[in-house]
Amino acid sequence: MEIMRIVVTGPVGAGKSTFIRTISEIEAVDTDRKATDEAASLKPKTTVAMDFGRLQFSPNMALHLYGTPGQERFDFMWDILIRKAHAFILLVSSHRPQDFRAARRISAFMRHRTKVPMILGCSHADNPNAWPMAEIALALGYLSPHGRPPMVAVNALDRSSVANAMMHLIQAYAEAQTTAVY
């Protein structure tokens, strides 16, 4: 059986743990602990190492989902988790522009370490203060629509929305495999 390793990353509170819990067929493994830093203003608990979930994608393929911590002080875990990833999704809270800089740093960190396909997942897009996806892309440094990764709105609480994001990511991976030069 083939295992595809997917990393779910993004700033604190973007919905990474919820994303994995929503789609995982097993009870997600998490390392949530009481938030004691700036994350406490967003939520009572935060991921300090990783989240793990599993999804049987087809009879011959399972997806292993690894969620990173959002805080930069845990970037050693970002490094560990991205090294063997096949693809990743960067979740960004559409309604918190103050998090866009952190999302941009996380994206740069990941892209520096790997060339695997990625997509941008815009969470909280239903919030009245949510930015349009095109403006989020600009804030993340993607100045041209032609050079940016695929973007998708994601409701991390909705299984079909998370499944849609996963399908976009798997499609990006499949397209990268067909265009790879060996």
Image (cartoon, rainbow, N blue to C red):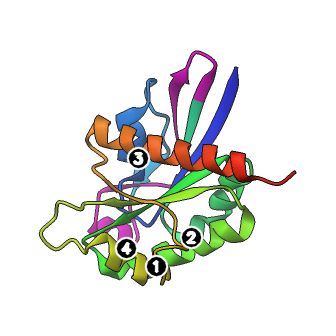
Quadrant in which residue 37 is drawn: bottom left
- Residue 107 image label: 2
What residue appears at the point 26 percent right and 73 percent down from the top-left corner? 132
Q: Nearer the viewer, mark 4 or mark 3?
A: 3
- Residue 123 image label: none
Identify the residue under disc 1.
Answer: 140
Q: Is residue 92 magenta?
A: no
What residue appears at the point 71 percent right and 61 percent down from the top-left corner? 115
Which residue occupies the extreme top position in the image? Answer: 59
Q: Nearer the viewer, mark 4 or mark 2?
A: 2
Give the vertical position of 177 relative to 1 (above or below).
below
Circle 1 residues within 10 Å: few <14, some 14–19, many ≥20: many
Q: Which amino acid, mark 4? A: Glu
Between the residue at mark 2 and the residue at mark 3, the CA separation in whole angstroms equals 17 Å
Query: Mark 2 or 3 closer to N-term?
Result: 2
Q: Is residue 49 magenta?
A: yes
169 left or right, relative to 127: right
Query: Mark 4 or 2 closer to N-term?
Result: 4
Between the residue at mark 3 and the residue at mark 1, the CA separation in whole angstroms equals 19 Å
Identify the residue under disc 3.
Answer: 165
Asked if the residue at tag 1 contacts the one at tag 3, i.e. Cβ–Cβ closer than 8 Å, the answer is no
Query: Mark 4 or 3 closer to N-term?
Result: 4
Between the residue at mark 4 and the residue at mark 2, the CA separation in whole angstroms equals 21 Å
What residue appears at the point 66 percent right and 68 percent down from the top-left corner? 111
Q: Considering the image in quadrants, where does the N terminus appear?
A: top right
59 left or right, relative to 145: right
Identify the residue under disc 4.
Answer: 38
| Region of the chain picked out in magenta, as a range | 35-62
Q: Which amino acid, mark 1? A: Leu
